[in-house]
Amino acid sequence: MENIVGYINANREKYIEELKDFLKIPSISTLAANKNDMLTAANFVSKKLDEAGMENVKIIETKGHPLVYADWLHTPGKPTLLVYGHYDVQPVDPVNLWDSPPFEPTIKDGNIYARGATDDKGQMYMHIKSVEAYFKTLGKLPLNVKFIIEGEEEIGSGNLEEFVNKNQEMLKCDAVMISDTSLYGPGIPTLTYGLRGLCYMEVAVTGPNRDLHSGTFGGGVDNPINVLAEMIAKLKDSNGKIKIPGFYKDVINLTKKERENFKTLPFSEKQYAKDLGVKELNGEKGYSTLERVWARPTLDCNGIFGGFTGDGAKTVLPSKASAKISMRLVPNQDPKKIGKLFTSYMKKIAPKTIKLEIKDLHGAYPIATSLDDKATTAAANSLAKVFGKKTVFMREGGSIPIVVTFAKKLKAAPVLMGMGLNTENLHSPNEHFNLNHFHLGILSSAYFFDEFSK
Amino acid sequence: MENIVGYINANREKYIEELKDFLKIPSISTLAANKNDMLTAANFVSKKLDEAGMENVKIIETKGHPLVYADWLHTPGKPTLLVYGHYDVQPVDPVNLWDSPPFEPTIKDGNIYARGATDDKGQMYMHIKSVEAYFKTLGKLPLNVKFIIEGEEEIGSGNLEEFVNKNQEMLKCDAVMISDTSLYGPGIPTLTYGLRGLCYMEVAVTGPNRDLHSGTFGGGVDNPINVLAEMIAKLKDSNGKIKIPGFYKDVINLTKKERENFKTLPFSEKQYAKDLGVKELNGEKGYSTLERVWARPTLDCNGIFGGFTGDGAKTVLPSKASAKISMRLVPNQDPKKIGKLFTSYMKKIAPKTIKLEIKDLHGAYPIATSLDDKATTAAANSLAKVFGKKTVFMREGGSIPIVVTFAKKLKAAPVLMGMGLNTENLHSPNEHFNLNHFHLGILSSAYFFDEFSK
């Protein structure tokens, strides 16, 4: 490892310059105007994989933006690792809030500022550089490696999902390395071993067949906003428990070890509340805040709309009110099953005076890897060596559907070894990536290749 | 009365032609582009009052659109009647839904179609023609009459309110005649003797200081939409009673006579529900639908808004949610007092995790005239004579603030002798006015002058 580490250290500045070139490409996947930039970015990735020493490098067309694939499979008997990442980025609006132009990478205080710096160009690029270090020093990798890099993560990964389903043999592997998450804090080696799932519903309540004058008709007929509010109020009890019958049935409770792990993490409820600007936190009784946001199912209204919402007063008794209501799920809850339970319960509590329409908009399965998994253990050991302290295990409250697809279809454990920080403004103006974490990430990747190959 | 009735009958067609000229003027008070049309309409009214025989006709400038005043005060010892009406009309959008152009009056099936036909040009004009009939046949009126016609009813009557406050001596009278309401049904002589008041509040609930990712933060912090829904759900109990402490304290309950009057009115709950497109009606337990919409206080959400309301799914835990909540009031509830009770209750039930802001947007006092009032009795008798059947007494669920101002400031009983119909599309495309009711309205006005003078 000494030579490899030496090579990575020696090339630190060169890698940053290369990352700058990558970050100059405005590869915004959601904008039609940037379609050519997507190709430029895909070409950049394939060129760098090729230069690093990977084989079979190819750009794979999809119905949308292309995938980039590469492999090197010359260590029979050793595990195979699939590295996933994405070269597409979020839009940059509102662009006037950026301190430096989003596609002119700018270094300030040890961070590189540009759209895509932390999400996910910088993080993905770490693994290409780790591969390069192996080839330039040893001429080979210690295990079999495949790369699959997509250009549609920010728009839902639809074409990659399809590709994975159809090309399971091509992508076959023992573990999937993904660096698209965050460290628990600066300099804290972190593995994310669980993601929540999602069940996202839309509920519409229709009362009268038209908007009515609330003076002329108020009191004679049920008001769909009031009805919807009353139904929402019946979704949770005063302890923050979700009242939908059967909702918790498939929940795998946190183990004692997991709860103890969470307790060891530096976390101040007071500071968390202060950062969010609330006087008090609140949630499901009997759980800590970290447990609530990482490992307990929740229910939130994401939007509500009905009647008059402009300035001032309009005396309308509206015909319709609707709400977006989503539930975050934990292993082993099934989003389809939860959607059905939600629908049955809402139908049960709806008064006969209104028409109820419910749509299941979107679902994602939850996932959690065993803390004893081989790849997870190898990653934890690698991070500890590079960062010089014990790796912490966290979960993430959000969902990354493609991670679940990899896990289910390829039957491979995901390793979420992210080097970002929650404070790095991903999806916002002034996105940046800490260059020390970039460097530590390349080292961690190199150590992981070694550890996992053993 | 015979001569007067003869004159009105003989001039039926002439009056309709004059009304057409009035309806051609696009006097939309809310649109700056129509400012000159407002003057044209005010001039039309003053000219017709003058031609009818009224004296002291004048156009009174205000900060907005002008008032038209006229009087004839030559019967000392007799009562003085103030006739109120408005020459402004609502906008015409969506104009493509009109079957004939809104300012090209068109007669079809005994109705005249034009913006302002029933609200309020046609109804107001009845009284000018009634006056004309007296002067042309008898050369005088049987009582003292004043007219005050405004051009800002559709935008809140702000300048007339101010004018009434400052000119109570000028407008002094014994009763105020207002034809700007509806008959209970076609051909049914109707007096509206009560209007509900209004207390219109806006409630904003703020949770976190910014929109959060509902995956990352969901479960850790109270969601302002859920909180707002839970607070709204606590405003009414399962019997439709409003739970705000003290809310019903000042309510004057309906008398036995009033309830019996309502019961005699032709009303089908089934048809009402069908018209509104609801399977079942609902409201405060223990009251009929007419009682609920006319004479019981109610609480309705007029609007609600928060979070993501576009198509599809966005996983946001919003910073803020707000609702417009209004209460219809009945005598002797005070909108200011009710606003305070509402605010205290909401503060009491708000969790400490959120910031609550409440604004009192708008208030109107309720009113109900005694069924034994002299002007009311005279109007009921006049209507019965003209329509040939017993006058029905109804209330109206909406508010007309200027009516309360007249009643309070001038200490004069309002007589709401409307000839419109709820089905005449006021404020909507294809507004119209039944020409038979127009004619009966002129006769009713003439009979009322006579009855009230006795």
Image (cartoon, coloured by chain):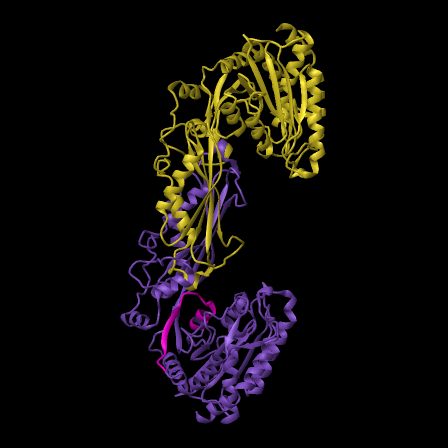
Chain colours: A yellow, B purple
Answer above or below: position of A85 versus B320: above
- Image quadrant where residue A143 sits: top right
- The residue nearer to you, when weighing A148 against B63, is A148
Answer above or below: position of A86 versus A52: below
Magenta stretch in the rendered image: B389-407
> What residue is shown at x 38% (from left), y 44% (from top)?
A346
Q: Across the whole image, how many numbered discs are drawn on residues?
A: 0
- The residue nearer to you, when weighing A73 against A149, is A73
Which quadrant would the C terminus of chain B be assigned to in this image?
bottom left
Would residue A44 appear left or right of A282 to someone viewing this image? right
> What residue is shown at x 68% (from left), y 27% (from top)?
A42
Would residue A324 appear left or right of B234 to someone viewing this image? right
Asked if the magenta segment contains residue B398, the reply would be yes
Regarding residue B57, the answer to whether it shows in the image is no
Answer above or below: position of B312 versus A434: below
Would residue A11 appear left or right of B418 to someone viewing this image? right
> What residue is shown at x 35% (from left), y 80% (from top)?
B390
Regarding residue B307, the answer to whether it shows in the image is yes
Answer above or below: position of A369 versus B242: above
Asked if the magenta segment contains residue B423, the reply would be no
Residue B395 is situated, as x and y percent measured from the top left of the image, at 38, 70
Residue A303 is situated, as x and y percent measured from the top left of the image, at 49, 43
Residue A75 is situated, as x and y percent measured from the top left of the image, at 60, 9
Which quadrant would the N terminus of chain B be assigned to in this image?
bottom left
Residue B372 is situated, as x and y percent measured from the top left of the image, at 33, 78
